[in-house]
Image (cartoon, rainbow, N blue to C red):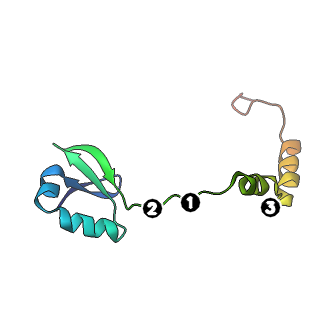
Amino acid sequence: MSAEPVDNLPSITVGALRQNPTSMIHDVRAGQSYVLTDRGVPTARIIPFRRSRWIPASQVRSLLQTDSFPQWAADIADVRQAESDRDPWESR
């Protein structure tokens, strides 16, 4: 059913899809993705449908304001202090 893989996904030609769409649809329902090719040119990705999960803005804001890794700030400060203003590509 599929031609050469594209982007590590199996590809399916328009002709093959016309001849047997049921098999590909079954695979996609099971989680498989395909690249649809038309005359050898990758044209579309066929991927399983997944409903969007919306997160309220207040929850996103709360997550972004939380200091999940307090040690990171100290680590970044240490690295910045250890760095010089010298251009790393400049020859010595």
Q: Position of residue 86 (x, y in %)?
A: 80, 31
> Circle 1 sits on which residue?
53
Label 3 is placed on what type of residue? Ser
> Circle 3 sits on which residue?
68
Label 2 is placed on what type of residue? Arg
* Residue 41 in the image: above or below residue 57: above
Q: Nearer the viewer, mark 3 or mark 1?
A: 1
Q: Position of residue 11 (x, y in %)?
A: 25, 55
Going from the N terminus, do you reach mark 3 or mark 2 first?
Answer: 2
Q: Which disc number belongs to residue 64?
A: none
11 or 65, nearer to the observer: 65
Q: Position of residue 5 (x, y in %)?
A: 27, 56
Q: Secondary structure at mark 2?
A: loop
> Circle 2 sits on which residue?
50
The reply to whether discs 3 and 2 touch (Cβ–Cβ < 8 Å) is: no
Quadrant position of residue 70: bottom right
Q: CA distance from mark 3 to mark 2?
A: 29 Å
* Residue 39 in the image: above or below residue 75: above
24 or 69, nearer to the observer: 24
Q: Position of residue 45 (x, y in %)?
A: 33, 51
Label 1 is placed on what type of residue? Arg
**Residue for point 72% across, 28% down:** 90
**Residue for point 27% across, 43% down:** 43
